[in-house]
Amino acid sequence: MKCATVQEWMPHYIDGQLSPDLEMQLRLHIDTCPACAQWLEETMELASIWEGKGSAFAEQGLPEYPDITNTVMSEIERLENDRRERSLPQTAVRRRTAPRTAWMHYCLAVGLTLILVQLGIFENFAYGISEINGHMSSSVSAWLSNTPPTDK
């Protein structure tokens, strides 16, 4: 058994929580390894000190651990109330994405499109798109074949 494994299982060994087989393997290793034997002694000393601390508090009439729950919770509540007081009040402004506003935007877009069609803005629009498509097609073909593009 390796020292790291023994040191990992040492607290369980001290508490008597190991199976008899595993306890015997740990005991054999500790008997043959001075470093692990020293580790066991130090761990047992720390465990006795730790157990003694609890009884020292009890002998003095003090609780084992000071109860700070009420103090902490009241401070959290105070901070939360302060944050709420500092926050901006809720406004009664209607959201911009209200249904009436959305319909107005759609109607405005349709109206502008109809005006542009009447003015002839889109008259040569299809021709321009096909012209751009032809230029893009020839430049991509030229790039794929590594030849300079030819202008039509």
Image (tube, rainbow, N blue to C red):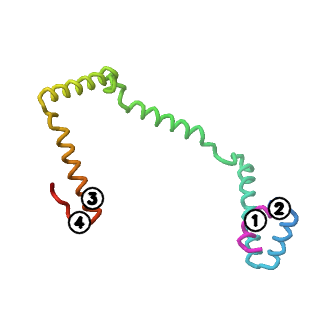
Residue at x 60%, y 40% (from the top left corner): 69
Q: Which quadrant holds residue 13?
A: bottom right
Q: Is mark 2 on a helix, strand or loop?
A: loop
Residue bearing the label numbered 2: 18
Residue bearing the label numbered 4: 147
Which residues fall within the magenta stretch? 1-13
Amino acid at circle 3: Ser
Q: Which quadrant holds residue 129?
A: top left
- Mark 2 or mark 3, earlier in chain: 2
On the image, the x and y values in percent for residue 60 come to 71, 49
Residue bearing the label numbered 3: 141
Q: In this view, does 42 lie above or below 121?
A: below
In the visual, does 80 lie left or right of 132? right
Q: Is residue 106 above or below residue 9?
A: above
Is 110 contained in the magenta span? no
The crowding category of the residue bearing disc 2, from other C-alpha atoms within 10 Å (few below 14, some 14 to 19, many at least 20), is some
Amino acid at circle 1: Trp
Q: How far apart are marks 3 and 1 (CA)?
A: 71 Å
